[in-house]
Image (cartoon, helix red, strand yellow):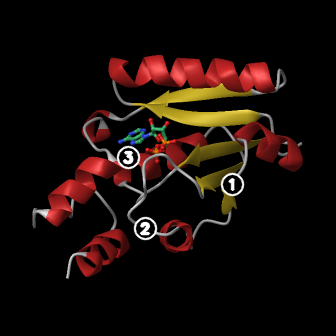
Amino acid sequence: MTKTIIYPGTFDPITNGHIDIIERSLLLFDEVIVAVATKSTKNPKFTCDTRISLIKEVFAHNKHVHVKQFSGLLTTFAQQLNVYVLLRGLRAVSDFEYEFQLANMNRKLCPKIETIFLPATNNYTYISASMVKEIADLGGDISDLVPKTVEIALRKTNC
Ligand code: ADP
């Protein structure tokens, strides 16, 4: 039986931290579905289509990574796919409170759903998409934080 996990998020844009979580999840699961939220309270810089294309470009070589968008409840989306395991990354204790609440709320909405957390790799604990965007806006070097294709997209939006 194929083991599949859903990795939901805004991915505005995808960073090396997200990529590390996806790659490590494939040591535990056969397939990962990166679920990009069309609507977000975070007021994304990139359109959903662009966020999806960037992820697809990064994982073009990996047929086990699938990218889909979702707009309603994550639990409804998961049920439609018949996948009941969610993946989230934890960078610091500060992530924990929100992630714990989210995992429990998702399980309340759909009791079959479980959330699995992977701790961020040391080198990536300080990377967040919002900080990457801020540094790019201010002309800083983001080459160690995101893949080349994302760096180019961020530079273009700042022209
Ligand atoms: P959301 O808006 O749902 O928080 P994000 O795209 O910001 O979406 O993050 C998606 C998931 O990836 C979250 O679980 C977040 O904690 C995790 N994540 C973000 N950056 C990193 C990182 N550098 N290392 C590990 N996990 C991360």
| Mark carried by residue 17 | 3
Distance in Å between CA atoms under marks 1 and 2: 16 Å
Give the structural element (helix, strand or loop) at label 2.
loop
Instruction: Identify the residue at horizontal 62%, vertical 53% (top origin).
Output: 34
Q: Nearer the viewer, mark 2 or mark 3?
A: 2
Q: Earlier in the sequence, mark 2 or mark 3?
A: 3
**Can you see residue 34?**
yes
| Mark carried by residue 71 | 1
Distance in Å between CA atoms under marks 3 and 1: 24 Å
Above/below status of 105 relative to 23: above
Distance in Å between CA atoms under marks 2 and 3: 18 Å
Ligand 1 positioned in quadrant: top left
Instruction: Identify the residue at horizontal 45%, vertical 17% (top origin).
Output: 97
Give the structural element (helix, strand or loop) at label 1.
loop
Instruction: Identify the residue at horizontal 72%, vertical 48% (top origin).
Output: 72
Rendering coords of residue 59 (x, y %): 54, 66
Instruction: Kindly identify which residue carries mark 2.
Output: 46
Marks 2 and 3 in Cβ contact (< 8 Å): no
Residue type at mark 1 is Ser
Residue type at mark 2 is Phe
CB at disc 3 and ligand 1 closer than 8 Å:
yes
Q: Where, quadrant-wise, is the N terminus in this rendering? A: top right
**Quarter location, residue 137:** bottom left
Above/below status of 41 relative to 141: above
Residue type at mark 3 is Gly
Q: Earlier in the sequence, mark 1 or mark 2?
A: 2
